[in-house]
Image (tube, grey):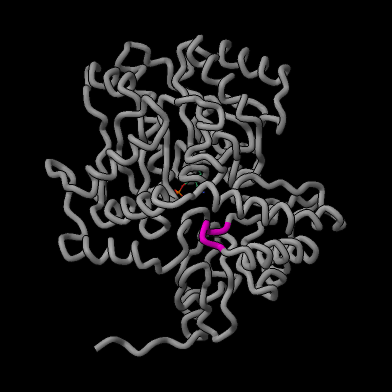
Amino acid sequence: MPEPALTVDELLAIDRRHVWHPYGPMPGRQDPLVVESASGVRLRPADGAGELVDGMSSWWSAIHGYNHPVLNEAAREQLGRMSHVMFGGLTHEPAVRLAKLLVDMSPEGLEHVFLADSGSVSVEVAVKMCLQYWRSLGRPAKRRLLTWRGGYHGDTWQPMSVCDPEGGMHELWTGVLPLQVFADAPPAEYEESYAERLRSLIERHADELAAVIVEPVVQGAGGMRFHSPAYLRVLREACDAHGVLLVFDEIATGFGRTGALFAAEHAAVTPDVMCVGKALTGGYLTMAATLCTSRVADGISRGEVPVLAHGPTFMGNPLAAAVACASIGLLLGQDWLAEVKRIEAGLRDGLAPALELPGVTDVRVLGAIGVVQLDHAVDMRAATEAAVREGVWLRPFRDLVYTMPPYVTGDADVARIARAVCAAAREG
Ligand code: PMP
């Protein structure tokens, strides 16, 4: 017999006492919204209040919306075979198909796929690959990473070390985390003087650098900043010239979000290692992947320890892999670029009035991403409530109100999301 459902109040009381939320204190100080179900682009709160249009795609991931019949069917079909099986010594069709799909759709030259279980872990794996590559080549001193300030690469240890050191996310660990090399965050437009500083920093530190790791074109959770793709070519050339590997973290930008399947394509650059996650399974299940070139894989294989020592229990989870294959199939089976461009146009129109609001310093839109920058820290509660009054779910943070809607969001809902962003910027 299933237990009787909890009332919303009972549920919140238990949540407050026992459940740790992202970046949350214990015990909880704010009551989260209880979601009962979600369908299409709408979240249905449990308290009977009206549905909310999702302006966040559950943090970049639910690109096809919720409860999608094709993804549901892929999950059901795979559940009937097996939901999980260890990957050690075994393989299966969903993982193999997914690896092939990823290799075929990603920038030319990425050949090998490690299936990780979250974005942060895929970055850990990328860093391990790079450090081990140099170790195998007899260059163990090459073990630091260079990155841009204002970046975000996840909450586990190595990724934290390349997050924005002043962003407030991981300041607590300054001096404890591995000490990496930071360049200033890239300017929005191409500036030769900045490119020159980047080149000389890479040259100066080349003997100790394993890799440069960046989010291409959009720095996400570290500040929602956009920059010229030309900097990616600068990085590629400088890394090649000075013997440093290049890692692109496409966990947020991948699968079409910026108007290219991967942001690296805006610059026609192939990194040595690429991380993807978030939208990989259409937001259904937790899975990420680290792709690398044959140069990296061969280098590791030639080492004293010729294996990549990483093997999570849920590696290659068949259920997640089957849904990922279906999600990629859905994406590539439609004119996804037209949908992303349609949302881009809607956000441009709808967010333009925000520029007139007091305290708004910038409005920027790229692909299916819209950002309103404030000159003050946003009052999260007031901003969220303003958006909810407009019938939209947003999650403003720091000095930003932003949206990255599912690609299936219709024009009227895009306009509604834009109105909610403006309201949140005004009242936050
Ligand atoms: N890299 C980037 C660019 C991200 O945006 C995120 C998640 N916000 C991560 C890494 C970490 O991914 P996850 O939350 O799945 O561990």
Is 189 or 127 nearer to us in this picture?
Answer: 189
- Image coordinates of residue 367 in percent, x first then y, are 60, 46
Above or below residue 219? Residue 70 is below
Instruction: Determine if residue 176 is in view.
Output: no
Specify the farthest residue to the left. Answer: 89
- Image coordinates of residue 358 in percent, x first then y, are 87, 57
Of the 4 image quadrants, the one containing the N terminus is bottom left
Residue 382 relative to residue 165: left or right: right
Residue 405 relative to residue 294: left or right: right
Which residue is found at the position 60% from the left and 40% from the top?
A: 219
Is 356 or 146 nearer to us in this picture?
Answer: 356
Residue 248 relative to residue 312: left or right: right
- Image coordinates of residue 326 in percent, x first then y, are 32, 54
Above or below residue 139? Residue 82 is below
Which residue is found at the position 66% from the left and 55% from the top?
A: 402
Is 425 or 15 nearer to us in this picture?
Answer: 425
Instruction: Determine if residue 247 is in view.
Output: yes
Which residue is found at the position 25% from the left and 17% from the top?
A: 303
- Number of disc labels: 0
- Image coordinates of residue 370 in percent, x first then y, are 66, 52
**Residue 97 among magenta residues:** no
* Magenta region, residue range: 405-409
Which residue is found at the position 42% from the left and 46% from the top?
A: 277
Q: Looking at the magenta stretch, what is its main secondary structure?
A: loop
Of the 4 image quadrants, the one containing the C terminus is bottom right
